[in-house]
Structure formats: structure tokens, C-alpha cells
Amino acid sequence: MEIRKMTARDLPSCIRISCDIGFPESQANLIRQWAGDQATSSVVAVVDRKVVAYLIYQRCVDGYAIWQLRVDPVYQWRGIGRDLVDYLKGRMTLRRWMICAVVNAEDASACEFLRACKFKAVDFKRQFYEDKQDAIEFRFVVDKELLEALS
């Protein structure tokens, strides 16, 4: 598997993945986020020259915020989502020592995935989404002393 920067040619595959897992409303968001400002970055996971997953994230003052992480249903449960999170963890520095993600509180698989990636639930957000659904904020935090030692 290869992880590389997302290009315009990858967008149709990413939109298909998003629709296949039940997030058709995120198509416009995906395009807007991909074409976003310089603080927004996006990568794809490629297997046998096929885009099978993508990650869109934003650089923040002290870390990164995951906006979208989607894996093609055919390729789920193969560690690809974890590899994308690990890619982001590998970008952490003394200045960017935290990763956060906000997910629908009813999405048990997303919550379990983040916990498996060593994220901790830090906040419950009532009626967070436009449709009044609740959300949970997760964070992965690296000890700054550990980062310093590894630098």
C-alpha cells in the first residue's frame, strides 16, 4: 500500500468511497475541503493502483484535526484506516502534538476505531450537527518530552 497526496484525479474515487459507506452528503464537503486553504491537507491510500481510502485533515495551532477518514468497504478491516492515522501521527512535532476528531455519538464503529488507535474521548457535544445529533470529540496526545527525545 502507498500513501500519497490526493490529486484532482483521485476525487471521483474518493466520492465513490464516501457514497459507498453512506456519506453522500459529504461530496460537496470533500471537494471544498480538498480545495481548501493551505492549512488543509489530504492523502489517499492506494492498493494495486486503486484509491481505497482517503484522509482529509487540517493543521491547527497545536496539532491536527481529522475532517474525513473513509475506507472503501471492500478494503475495511485490513488496517488501512489505522495506517492513515499512523501517517498523521508520524507528522507530529513539538509544535503539533495532538490529533483531534469529532464523530457522531451514535457511530459506534467510528468511536471504536478511534479508541483502537489510542484516541481518548474528551468531550460530549449535544446537538452538535445541523440535524441536532450529538457528537463525541476524541483526542490523541503525545507526551511532548517523548517527542523531544525522538527529535
Image (tube, helix red, strand yellow):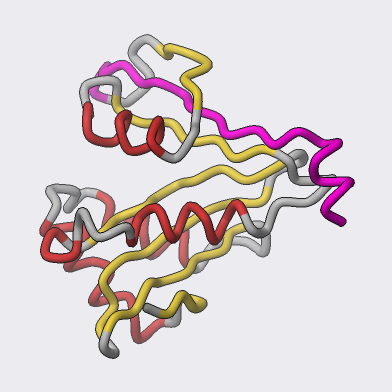
Residue at horizontal 50%, vertical 66%?
Answer: 42
Q: Nearer the viewer, residue 115 or 12?
A: 115
In this image, 63 relative to 32: left or right?
A: right
Magenta segment, which residues? Answer: 131-151
Total number of numbered discs in the rendering: 0
In this image, 79 relative to 19: left or right?
A: right
- What percent of the width, then of the height, locates residue 126? 37, 9
Q: Which corner quadrant holds the C terminus?
A: bottom right
Q: Quadrant of residue 51?
A: bottom left
Magenta stretch holds residue 137: yes
Q: Quadrant of residue 20?
A: bottom left
Residue at horizontal 62%, vertical 46%?
Answer: 64
Q: Which corner quadrant holds the N terminus?
A: bottom left
Residue at horizontal 21%, vertical 22%?
Answer: 106
Residue at horizontal 31%, vertical 66%?
Answer: 53
Q: Nearer the viewer, residue 65 or 143?
A: 143
Up/down of 73 relative to 95, above or below: below
In this image, 26 relative to 75: left or right?
A: right
Q: Quadrant of residue 73?
A: bottom left
Up/down of 9 relative to 127, above or below: below
User: Can you name the residue that lies furthest to the bottom here?
Assistant: 49
- What percent of the width, then of the height, locates residue 104? 29, 27
- What percent of the width, then of the height, locates residue 6? 45, 76
